[in-house]
Image (tube, rainbow, N blue to C red):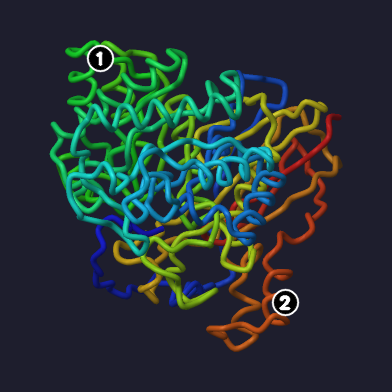
Amino acid sequence: MIDRRQLLLAGTAITASTLLGNRAAFADDGTAEKLSVEVDLTKPVGALDHIWSKCGGSDRANITMRDDWRQDLVRFQKEAGLERVRFHGIFNDENGVYTPILGQQKVPNWQNVDRIYDGLLERGVQPFVELGFMPQYLASGKATFGYYKANITPPTDYADWGNFLKAFVQHLIDRYGSAEVRQWYFEVWNEPNLGFFWSGTQADYFELYKASVTALKSVDPKLMVGGPSTSRIAWIPEFLAYCDSNRLPIDFVSTHLYAGDDQKAIFGAANSYTQNDVIPAGVKKVKEWIDASAYRGIPFWLTEWSSDSPAMIAHVIKGCLGVCDGMSQWTMSGTYEELGPSAYVIKEGDNGWGMTAPAGIPKPQFNTYKLLHRLGNQRLWASDGPVLASKKKDGSFAIGVWNLADVSQPKGIPGTSVIRKVVGSRKTVSVSIKGARKGQKATVTYVDQERGSPHPAWRRLGSPQYPSPAELATIRKSAELQPPATVTIGAGGVLSLDLPPECFALIELKPV
């Protein structure tokens, strides 16, 4: 994972526990550290809400009309249970929503908006609507962001912006019906605390939120509107206080946090947490702010976060259960051009974002989500540590266990680093399963940087920058999850697994 928002390269020191590219450099003397976890199949502890599949992030609205992006969407929805997609730029000038054409355009043009949202709904996924960026017809300036030149300035007139949003949501209701659109989330802007996404001040953003929520609620009071969609969990207390003092509704709070973010800015001190724990600690802090405000109990969404490590993904998600109502990992698809088209399909080290690589190639991130989707909706008691246990509707059980490593999530422009640092060791994990019996069969499916990863096959092919169609097919096939291994549970319901660093394993077994 990369903190794209820094947009600066950072130097990387090579240590004894380093992955050059994604290849392990660990000394292996034939022994492994031992770790024990416990699960009780007979002890439900409540619902297991799949908050991780509530939403997935994506580049921008316009790119969702491409066939390769839509193929990724279909796969993510079918295999990993994706419910919504959040992307930038529904109002970007490239969509022609409100752009003067030879001075003739006087009213918005919703043709591409319809194509974009139709494309999601036809594939069983709803939009998580990000209200931005600024159509040039309404913009107060010419400052832009990104390869696609999104206007990031405040509106010339907030009343005109509000009228534009009224027309937008009225069109959505006319096309899709109020019952459908009331299920969508409308998030005001993206990361307004960063100057390259919002050229205005905090006060300007608060005024934008006021105009936006007032406009949408005037069309339908049941539309769900929230914010502030800030990076590094910034502005949350100020936003809540502003809305309270102005009697403004907030239907949900949203913010972003990445493991590589500046911890001094977030927690007041550098190196407060390992990168594995930055996100769980940060979201708990936001939850405390919400519960101390006039908006106690409203939903909280982490609408951007990321990781490229299977075990880290599982660890972060477990730490966010009961705190977040929804999470959205950045990004769902490798069809991604925020800083321009990438010059590679697969590369060593940092591969930018995308839980799939271009050409529909699954990465370890996607395969982790695929396994997490196989967890049930009833959570079972499990000990603290790297384990999450569940019961499925058919009465069978699914247990995730993982070997957490300290994986550096480098800052910088996506795709520039060829170094990926991992500090960790191989572990033998003893899983004690109360309710299982000796001799019972279970299956185990693994994902790490070698299994369920495109890198091994890509390297065997000579690490091509531009793989041929035949090479792409080979890489794509080899990156799929391997068939599950059948294992036998030992005495006392104990199952022993050998897990390399970063590995996530899903144990599945039927009731006795």
- For disc 2, the neighbor class at 10 Å (few under 14, some 14 to 19, many from 20) is some
Q: Horizontal placement of 455 versus 60: left or right?
A: right
The quarter of the displayed image where residue 173 is located: top right
Q: In this view, does 477 lie above or below 273?
A: below
Sequence-first disc among 2 and 1: 1
Position of residue 375 relative to residue 425, above or below, is above
Residue 195 is at least partly visible in this image = yes
* Quadrant of image for the N terminus: bottom left
Residue 399 seen: no
Q: Where is residue 509 in the image (x, y as percent from the top left)?
A: 80, 38
Q: Residues within 10 Å of mark 1 (few under 14, many from 20)?
A: few
Q: In this view, does 322 lie to the left or right of 372?
A: left
- Front residue of 246/93: it is 93
x 24%, y 27%: residue: 159
- Disc assigned to residue 363: none
Cα distance, mark 2 to mark 1?
54 Å
- Asked if residue 7 is positioned above or below residue 317 in the image, the reply reads below
Identified at 59% across, 70% down, the residue is: 30
Residue 293: give its label: 1
Figure quadrant of residue 320: top left
Residue drawn 42% across the image and 45% down it: 97
Q: Which of 41 and 20 is in front in this view?
A: 20
The percent position of residue 379, horizontal first and vertical second, equals 63, 26
Q: Residue beneath label 2, please?
A: 474
Residue type indicated by callout 1: Ser
